[in-house]
Image (cartoon, rainbow, N blue to C red):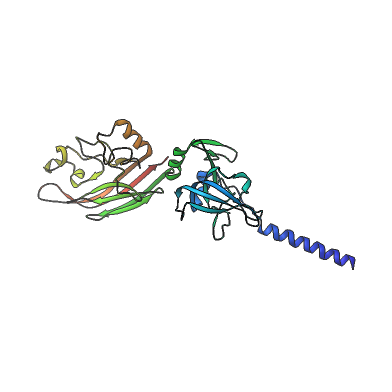
Amino acid sequence: MKKLALEFVLIGIGFIIFSFSAGACSCAWRGPFLVAAKDAVLIVQGKITRHYTGKSPAMGVYVLEDLKGGGLDSGMVVQMGDGMHCRPTLEGFPPGSEWILALNGSGSKPGEGWALSHCGEYWLRVENGEVIGSIDGTRAQVKRMPLEEFKRKLRYPRFHETFTGQVFQGKRICRPFGDNFYLILEPMQPDGWEILVKEVGRDENLARLTPPLHFVPNPRYIKGWHLLEDPSGCATREYDADAGPANPREFIFSPEVGARFAGPNAGRAVTPEEVEEIRRFGRGSLTIKKFRLQAKADGCPGIEWIRFSVQLEGGY
């Protein structure tokens, strides 16, 4: 009888251990913040206001800025570690401290609310205008970075993309790239296209400061006479140029165009140093592979269609 009772006790202990391990967290580290945070639904900069202890530990966060996604208001509650979920414990986040938090990331098991995962670097400390933690290095590599520089890297991560396409006279092409941009071929009158780069939520053409800005045709424009071996028969060609822009068409772009550089109230021309800063952020190349021209009496042909390839690279 004693042996049978002991067996029941051992079975009960085993069941408890199994139940705990089944609910406990086991996850691989998903990388530094700029890697791991890509799968987070919401990223905020905020201050810890209070701790909620007990069965479901959590912390109150006063949101200073939404960096990705959109919170409902300035106050939120974030679920934290309780030994059964993949979340850090409250002790590392004292009230009054300031953080960048990437919420509902991989492994956080958020349920119906917001939660912070410990399956990667989903949080960074903010102190004295700097961000501190594993920003883009190894797990143990603690870095410091100016807050504004970090925000630029977070919003505009590095990209390198290529694609091909075909566009017909009078038609528009709009292709997303990176995390925030569109490449557009905008039809012009009476024919051809203008190359535009736009950021989500803005009307500014971020490529409009592509040089040269004067004296020769700009590579952002694609016109029929550009594709002629001898364009001299087109009397209305810009600058009476002997040739159109080179193929491929090289252009530059940056989200700072229209903001820091040559904004709507700019009282001066863009400087060579500013152009170079724009180039460092973003570069594009459009190669016209094939085309068909439409002859016109004035010697300035239209373009029926072009086939092209595009390369885009940049980011912070």
- Which of the pair 222/187 is nearer the observer? 187
Residue drawn 43% across the image and 41% down it? 152
Among the 4 quarters of the image, the one containing residue 280 = top left
160 lies left or right of 210: right
Q: Of 6 and 58, which appears nearest the observer?
A: 58
Residue at 16% across, 40% down: 238
Nearest the eye: 102 or 250? 102
How many marks can you see? Answer: 0
| Residue with the most extreme left position | 297
Seen at 82% across and 63% down, the residue is: 9
Image coordinates of residue 286 in percent, x first then y, are: 31, 45
Q: In the image, residue 145 lies at what x, y percent? A: 49, 36
Q: Nearer the viewer, residue 149 or 77?
A: 77
- Residue lying farthest to the bottom in this orientation: 1
Residue 277 location, x and y as percent?
Answer: 35, 34
Residue 57: horizontal and vertical position, in percent?
62, 54
Placement of the C terminus among the 4 image quadrants:
top left
Q: Quadrant of the N terminus?
A: bottom right
Asked whether, in this view, residue 207 is left or right of residue 10, the answer is left
Residue 19 vs residue 7: left or right?
left
Write down the quadrant of residue 259 in the picture: top left
Q: Residue furthest right?
A: 1
